[in-house]
Amino acid sequence: MPAGGAKSDKESAEVTEEATTEESKATEEAPTEETSDATEASDAADKDTKDTEDAKEDAETAEEWPESSDEPEKAKRKIQWSRVVAYGILPGLALLLALGAGYARWQYTSSNYSALPPAASEQHPSPAMESMNAARDSTIKMLSYKPDTVGEQLNAARDLLTGDFRDSYTTLINDVVIPGAQQKQISAVASVPAVASVSADPKHAVVLVFVNQTVVVGQDLPSDTASSVRVTLDKIDGRWLISEFEPV
């Protein structure tokens, strides 16, 4: 074979091989481009689906909002009713129960008291009641006087006392109170707003006495004092007499 013919055949073979290689590359790249286009189309479809779902959720939220806005109103109404029950109905019921119990107690006490014989309820008071009355009356007389009659008033009050306290009171009024009241025109008015029995038996009693006293010296303005006194009394010859008088 001539050298020129061999060279021509070689060049033809190389051209054929290059064509075959290019066709193979084209064949491999074609599916890749188609796959890419399909992927982009799928992503676009997913995006559209997501947008549709988001719009649907927004619409459902918008529809549900009025219902949720009613919930605070319902809760508010419940709170108001609870306040009505707590501050209106329950106190009213408690008041009715208290009034009913008080009325029942009054009926029970009244019926029992009226059933007692007159001698037991009126003519024979208890030692506690007797001693409280005596402590109240005697305290008022001991601490009340006027300049013109101070001697008579306080000496009369002395007869309501007994024992060492009687002696101490006598010395005090004769040496201090009576002369001072007469010279400086001092007057005093005592009142006892309350008394309480501490202990009592037929012969001995202790009473807590609450005393208010108003004192006027000459033309000065009145001065008021309040105090409490522990008063001890002994029953002697049928009379409750003060044996101790201790401020507390």
Image (cartoon, grey):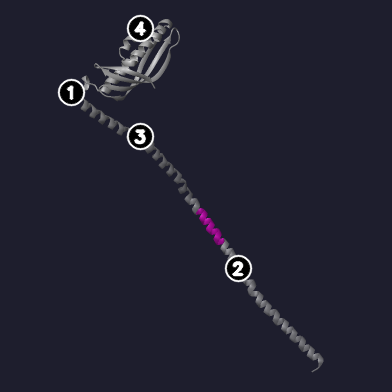
Q: Residue 105, how many percent across, how many down?
A: 26, 30
Q: Residue at x 30, y 31 (%)?
A: 99
Rounded to the nearest whole Å, what is the CA distance between mark 3 and mark 1? 41 Å
Which quadrant of the rendered structure holds the N terminus? bottom right
Q: Nearer the viewer, mark 2 or mark 1?
A: 1
Q: Which residue is mark 1?
A: 117
Query: Element under label 3?
Result: helix
For the residue pair 35 and 77, the one nearer the viewer reads as 77
Say which quadrant the C terminus sits in.
Answer: top left
Q: Earlier in the sequence, mark 2 or mark 3?
A: 2
Closest to the observer, 156 or 164: 164
Please, what secondary structure does the residue beneath circle 2 have? helix
Q: What's the mark number on residue 166? A: none
Q: Do tag 1 and tag 4 residues touch (Cβ < 8 Å)?
A: no
Q: Image quadrant of residue 80?
A: top left
Which kind of residue does numbered mark 3 sit on? Pro
Q: Earlier in the sequence, mark 1 or mark 4?
A: 1
Indicate left or right for 66 with 246 as reference: right
Q: Is residue 56 magenta?
A: yes
Q: Which residues are magenta?
A: 48-59
| First in residue order: circle 4 vs circle 3 | 3
Q: Nearer the viewer, mark 4 or mark 3?
A: 4
Identified by mark 2, the residue type is: Thr
Q: Which residue is mark 3?
A: 91
Question: Is 168 in the magenta?
Answer: no
The prevailing secondary structure element of the residues shown in magenta is: helix
- Residue topped by disc 2: 39
Marks 2 and 4: which is nearer the front?
4
Mark 1 belongs to which amino acid? Answer: Pro
Q: Earlier in the sequence, mark 3 or mark 1?
A: 3
**Cα distance between the residues tagged 2 and 4:** 127 Å
Q: Position of residue 72 (x, y in %)?
A: 45, 44
